[in-house]
Amino acid sequence: MLVERRVRAAVLESFRSPFKVVETTVRVPEDWVEVRVRAVGVCGRDLVVWKGGFPNLRTPLILGHEVFGEYEGVPVSVFPGLSVEECRRAGGECPGYAILGEHVPGGYADRVYVPRSNLIPLPDRDYRKYAAATCGVATIMHASSVAGIRPGERVLVTGASGGVGVHGLQYLINLGVEVIALTRSEEKARILEGLGARAVTRPDFYREMGRVDAVLELVGARTINWSMRALRQKGRLVLVGNVTGEQVIIERPALLVMREISLHGTAAFTPKEWRSAIQVISRGIIKPFYKVYDLDEINEAYEAALKGERVGRIVLEP
């Protein structure tokens, strides 16, 4: 049975248009629990959704899958993946993997309603750092597992100054991986160097520095062909994201054949990886990079995110 709950939320009424922060009603299963949102990350995936990059989604939408807050006064995270059964109970159009904020109302709101089984305890109440870094670290954990990355290997991370890149590469460095971090500006490169990465601003860096064992491709269409050129024989590339939504075209298929390159995709992360990311962040292994905006400032926040001028994640607070 579905029940109506009142929330104050940023609603996307049509793609590529400003959000409207309003009091609205959401319909959710009656046994889903209420989480008071304290901080929610603005993911690169959210930006692709805002642009209309997922044709199966329909507006109006309340986005936000990186949710951290309180359930009955206890600090919690919300694991963003929903089972198909729970998604259908909520009346959503449910693919094989349903996501909070896309198939059910998400965390760009003062409250969010989710299955109790999706709640994961937080070690402390520093919600901002978890909203900034958890998704990025968990994403790279999963992608590095898909790629079979081992300590001592050389790995290229594209889009390295974004929310996934800057936090995920710290996880890789902690594992003993040599990270080549591709970013667009010298200023960002200096920040990444300070974290222990070898930062580059040219995609043809390999001409001077040599090739890499694996690539975690966070940008997609705009850099993937350069990334393939940077791979050694039998190198592995994992496509993590495609930020512009453009068609990904392989310009030189001969590279795949002659170098025996492996291409993989990675969908998201597991609950175990999400929990592990939280623990890594809580121990101070990851330095969080973020800027905080009030929920009422969401359109200003999106304007900043779309420009891609800052390092790290944008965090919204209701």
Image (cartoon, rainbow, N blue to C red):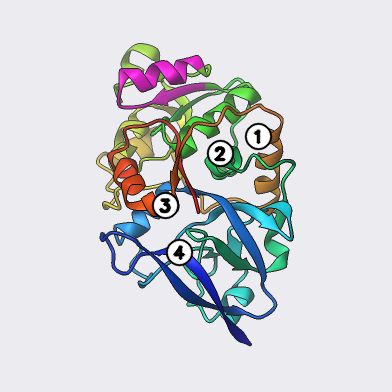
- Point out residue 1 in the picture as x, y percentages from the top left corner: 63, 87
Q: Which residue is mark 4?
A: 9
Residue type of the residue flagged with mark 2 = Ala
Foreground label between 3 and 2:
2
Whether residue 97 sits left or right of residue 215 in the image: it is right
Residue type of the residue flagged with mark 1 = Ile
Whether residue 265 is visible to the viewer of this picture, yes or no, is no
Pointer 3 with pointer 1, Cβ within 8 A: no
- Residue 133: image tag: 2
Q: Nearer the viewer, residue 247 or 311?
A: 311
Crowding near the residue tagged with mark 1, few <14, some 14–19, many ≥20 C-alpha atoms within 10 Å? many
Q: Is 97 colored magenta in this rendering?
A: no
Residue type of the residue flagged with mark 3 = Arg
- Point out residue 161 in the picture as x, y percentages from the top left corner: 41, 30
Q: CA distance from mark 2 to mark 1?
A: 7 Å
Going from N to C along the chain, the mark reached first, 4 or 3, is: 4
Span of residues in magenta: 179-194
Pointer 2 with pointer 1, Cβ within 8 A: yes
